[in-house]
Amino acid sequence: MLRDSFCGLLRLSQATAVAFLISVAGCATVAPTLENIQGKYELRGKYVYAGESFEIRGDTFSYSRFSDVVNDPSIQGMPVRGRYTLSGSTITFHHSRVSDPKRTLERHFGRFTLWTPSQMAERTKAGKTPLDVLYQVR
């Protein structure tokens, strides 16, 4: 009797393990491509007083900074537009007014995120996602 119960549990565990492996296989890492990185990238917070955003369309991008500071010189002439290149998970925005033009693309919650080198270093050091990472919203 005990042996039958154990064997039944073992079969259930094997079935659970197989289901888990199938579901994990479906969650393979999605590499950035020119097609799937398209869209707008913004901060996730509701109450944001300053920051930046990108919009990637085709082989061009639009970049903008925003601030609640009146007459902030860093936002004059925004948005700016230019071209970008993609190499693996590194995207480089070719415009002199883009702060941190070389960024890393990673998937979080099913969407891509844009990370500056300092944000990547902060995550490595503190083990947390910085609040100013840009998320793909569409």
Image (cartoon, rainbow, N blue to C red):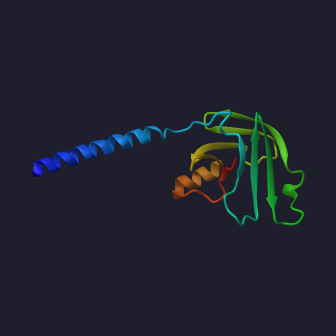
As rendered, which of 36 and 131 lies closer to the eye? 36
Left or right of residue 81, residue 5 in this image: left
Residue 34 placement: quadrant = top right
Residue 38 placement: quadrant = top right
Residue at 80% across, 58% down: 66
Q: Position of residue 41 (x, y in %)?
A: 71, 49
Residue at 56% across, 38% down: 30
As rendered, which of 11 and 118 lies closer to the eye? 11
Q: Position of residue 134 (x, y in %)?
A: 67, 52
Left or right of residue 54, residue 113 in this image: left
Left or right of residue 137, residue 3 in this image: left
Left or right of residue 77, residue 129 in this image: left
Residue at 23% across, 43% down: 11
Q: Position of residue 81 (x, y in %)?
A: 83, 42
Residue located farthest toward the left when viewing the structure as drawn: 1
Establish if 56 lies above or below 122. above
As rendered, which of 123 and 25 lies closer to the eye? 25
Establish if 4 lies above or below 84. below
Q: Position of residue 57 (x, y in %)?
A: 76, 38
Establish if 89 lies above or below 51. above
As rendered, which of 94 and 110 lies closer to the eye? 110
Residue at 17% across, 45% down: 7
